[in-house]
Image (tube, rainbow, N blue to C red):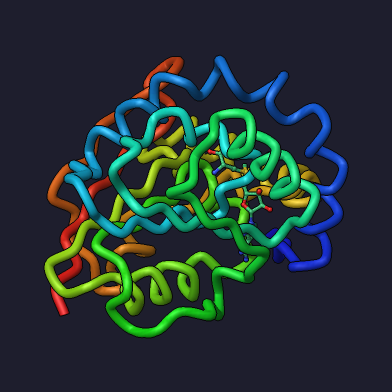
Amino acid sequence: MDVALEKRQVERAYELYAPVYDFIFDWIFAPGRAAAIKQCGIVPSDTVLEVGIGTGLNLPLYPATCRLTGIDLSGEMLDKAVERVQNLAMPNVTLKVMDATSMDFGDNEFDKALATYTISAVPDPVAVLREMRRVVKPGGTLVILNHFRSERRVTGWLEDLVAPVCTRLGWKSNLALKPLLVEVGLTPELVHQVNMFNGWRLVKCVNRK
Ligand SMILES: C[S@@+](CC[C@H](N)C(=O)[O-])C[C@H]1O[C@@H](n2cnc3c(N)ncnc32)[C@H](O)[C@@H]1O
């Protein structure tokens, strides 16, 4: 049974998760975060977009020389990111509440875009990736870090089985990577397995337009 993830459901879920998110998800996801920022290959004065920045757990990993814009659908998650920006004194960061399926940016505004643990938490991952492609310059870098449906039969079947419950909690457990990339016209340059049990994939693509 395929249960669709709704925008209101995501907003409600992250309103609830915001106060405890860092406590639960900081250390578990940390190795993947460091690897993802490294794969962005950020050079001085790069313009970088982080999609679904959440509470801003990636913020300390960015070089101070880049210009970073972070967007998120959840005002409650973003409030935490605002606090973190203030505590870390990062004048190079701009944060905005925005739906990543229809971004308020022009075409080709960014050198790089990153989405960590977000693409399976959005109601429409295809629309989000298409928007990321639109706002990143031709030849720019897209980095996606996420759990995707396993290509192993039993694990994939289990992920399908728990999908209706996970959807109600605010994410998809069985989002398949290959069809997603095909649908948005992306070819990965690199796919690495990261984090505990190698259960998450770090995907780097060049934005060929
Ligand atoms: C699992 S959290 C990941 C947060 C952060 N990227 C991290 O690495 O910890 C997923 C985030 O995606 C955000 N999100 C979900 N749908 C979105 C959308 N359509 N536009 C922007 N952000 C969205 C949620 O509000 C939430 O903050």
Instruction: Give me the residue at 32% from left, 74% from top.
Output: 109
Instruction: Give me the residue at 45% from left, 41% from top.
Output: 146
Instruction: Give me the residue at 45% from left, 43% from top.
Output: 148
Outermost residue to the bottom: 106
Q: Nearer the viewer, residue 22 or 83?
A: 83
Compared with 75, 26 (above or below) is above
Q: Quadrant of residue 72?
A: bottom right
Q: Nearer the viewer, residue 110 or 167?
A: 110
Q: Nearer the viewer, residue 197 or 83?
A: 83
Which image quarter is the C terminus in? bottom left
Which image quarter is the N terminus in? bottom right
Instruction: Give me the residue at 43% from left, 49% from top.
Output: 92
Compared with 207, 166 (above or below) is above
Q: Position of residue 204 (x, y in %)?
A: 23, 48
Q: Position of residue 202 (x, y in %)?
A: 32, 38
Q: Nearer the viewer, residue 204 or 153?
A: 204
Q: Position of residue 30 (x, y in %)?
A: 47, 21
Q: How many marks?
A: 0
Q: Position of residue 33 (x, y in %)?
A: 41, 30
Q: Quadrant of residue 98?
A: bottom right
